[in-house]
Amino acid sequence: MRQLRREGWMHNRARLVTGSFLTKELEVDWRRGEAWFMRLLLDGDEANNNGNWQWIASVGTDPQPFFRRMYNPASHMERFDPDGDYVRRYVPELVPVPDAYLREPWTMPVATQEAVGCVIGSDYPAPIVDRKVARVRAAERYRAAAAATG
């Protein structure tokens, strides 16, 4: 999101991870994310942006199961940013965090947080949602919607 605000652009992988997190785990209507991105994107194309948000929110016309679009940010970072270059570029408070904790810095022992100067809840935000609980809730929501529409 910092890249989007600063540069008016965000890599598509980061857009998808953001959209998945917002719609599935935070339960925010996809249209709010779509509108925010459209407002900030320099390359914003209404049809493309709208379609991508519907796709990642699993509300579009693509018949893929919702769970295929429940992206785990840590897994995507491991796969697409294994050295943490992208994250460290846009989140400078994570620069000193050891690689082992970079994907989920809140798992760092407090002593390590203090030693590297990145205390969770002070220098870097604490998680705003329990991802495991949020994933279960999202699955329940999508299954209920599928059952209701037949």
Image (spheres, rainbow, N blue to C red):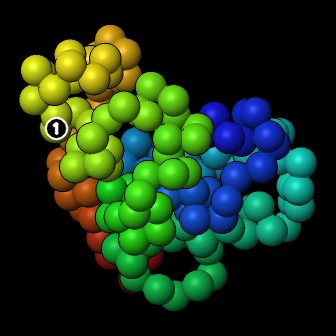
- Left or right: residue 63 versus residue 44 is left
Q: Classify mark 1: helix, strand or loop.
A: helix
| Residue that label 1 marks | 107
In the rendered view, would you say 142 is above or below 84? below
Camera-side residue of 125 and 90: 90
Direction top: furthest residue: 122
Whole-percent x and y of residue 47? Answer: 85, 67
* Quadrant housing residue 128: top left
Whole-percent x and y of residue 119? Answer: 27, 18
Q: Residues within 10 Å of mark 1 (few under 14, many from 20)?
A: few
Q: Dividing the image into 4 quarters, which one contains the N terminus?
A: top right
Residue name at image x 51 percent, y 51 percent: 85
Camera-side residue of 20 and 86: 86
In the rendered view, would you say 61 is above or below 6? below
* Quadrant housing residue 11: bottom right
Direction bottom: furthest residue: 63
- Left or right: residue 104 versus residue 27 is left
* Quadrant housing residue 135: bottom left
> Is residue 145 among what the camera can see?
no
Q: Amino acid at mark 1?
A: Thr
Whole-percent x and y of residue 89? Answer: 58, 41
Residue name at image x 80 percent, y 68 percent: 48
> Is residue 7 among what the camera can see?
yes
- Left or right: residue 43 versus residue 131 is right
Whole-percent x and y of residue 69? Answer: 44, 71
In the rendered view, would you say 100 is above or below 7? below
